Image: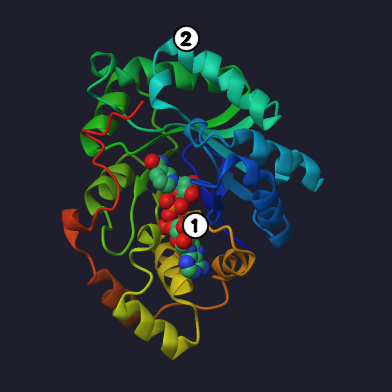
Amino acid sequence: MIPNVQLNDGTAIPQLGFGTFLVPPEQTAQTVGEALRLGYRHIDTAQGYANEEGVGRAIAESGIPRDEVYVTSKLDNGNHRPDDVRRSFDETLRKLGVERLDLFLIHWPVPMLYDGDYVSTWKAMAELVEGGRLTSVGVSNFEPAHLDRVVGETGVVPAVNQIEAHPYFPNDTARAASHAHGIAVEAWGPLGQGAVLDDPVITKIAEARSRANSQVILRWHIQRGDIVFPKSTHRERMAENLALFDFALSADEVAAIDGLSQGEAGRVGPHPDTFDLH
Ligand code: NAD
């Protein structure tokens, strides 16, 4: 039911998954367990979300074979030094209770830290794939210049770039740069972290189609070809966000949603050039 997106390393990722940012650690096993029961088979977590253990417990308790659940985690900003990449990757595997991770991303480039040397971080990440315990390696919040640098200096092209993208901030610049390198785009905050949900243009399309506003927005992402993993802790909303493959938006509807772009002003998260939380 959920289509796969082919990645440049020959592997495939489910186009729709489940996000876990701000899912409280003590609630994660239960929430992710519910997501797996509903049919999600792709979970997006991060070292910085402090909930990898809950994700791992949910996968173990689900009884679903490991190979049927796609798991992504991300390197925390404080772990950019190569030794910390290796050490914290081991910790991520241990917390998730898995022997192999599907996808590991540099969470933010933090170009103002470590003398701006996210290239050595990237090399250490790529070596994890050679070690066999990681299938795919990618980046997150990389602007065009960051992508050019890691590709130019290492020759290793990230499989994905996970960036903020939604109708208010389609992030076309970073998206186009990713595509130019053959990198698949993952759209984080696909609902604008809630900001886009009640937009009148979205409501009008949703009412005409008897669909939820969230479904209209997420379907727009799907038709753009991006990978999404909306987050909700409510069962009905989780189910709603999964039901995107029995309808399609018309070209006019897509154009109307494209028209909601506010450019840079539509960003809900921090700018990757300056974000340095660690
Ligand atoms: P989102 O756009 O998925 O919005 C989440 C919010 O929307 C929820 O808190 C909920 O209140 C609301 N919502 C969700 N489904 C709904 C529905 N059907 N009806 C009504 N309201 C609904 O924002 P997000 O969680 O920030 O982004 C998705 C995922 O992307 C995260 O969980 C995380 O895995 C990832 N992410 C990555 C980064 C990064 O820097 N790489 C940053 C933020 C998020």
Q: Indicate if the residue with disc 1 has its beta carbon within 8 Å of ligand 1.
A: yes
Q: Residue at x 47, y 9 (%)?
A: 83
> Where is 152 relative to 140, above or below?
above
51 relative to 62 in the view: left or right = left
Viewer-closest of 20 and 27: 27
129 relative to 165 in the view: left or right = right
Q: Residue at x 26, y 34 (%)?
A: 275
Residue type, label 2: Asp
93 relative to 185 in the view: left or right = right
Q: CA distance from mark 2 to mark 1?
A: 32 Å
Q: Residue at x 53, y 32 (%)?
A: 136
Residue 96 x %, y %: 66, 32
Ligand 1 quarter of the rendering? bottom left
Q: Residue at x 58, y 37 (%)?
A: 51
Residue 48 x %, y %: 47, 32
Secondary element at tag 1: loop
The residue indicated by pointer 1 is: 230
Residue type, label 1: Pro
Q: How many marks?
A: 2
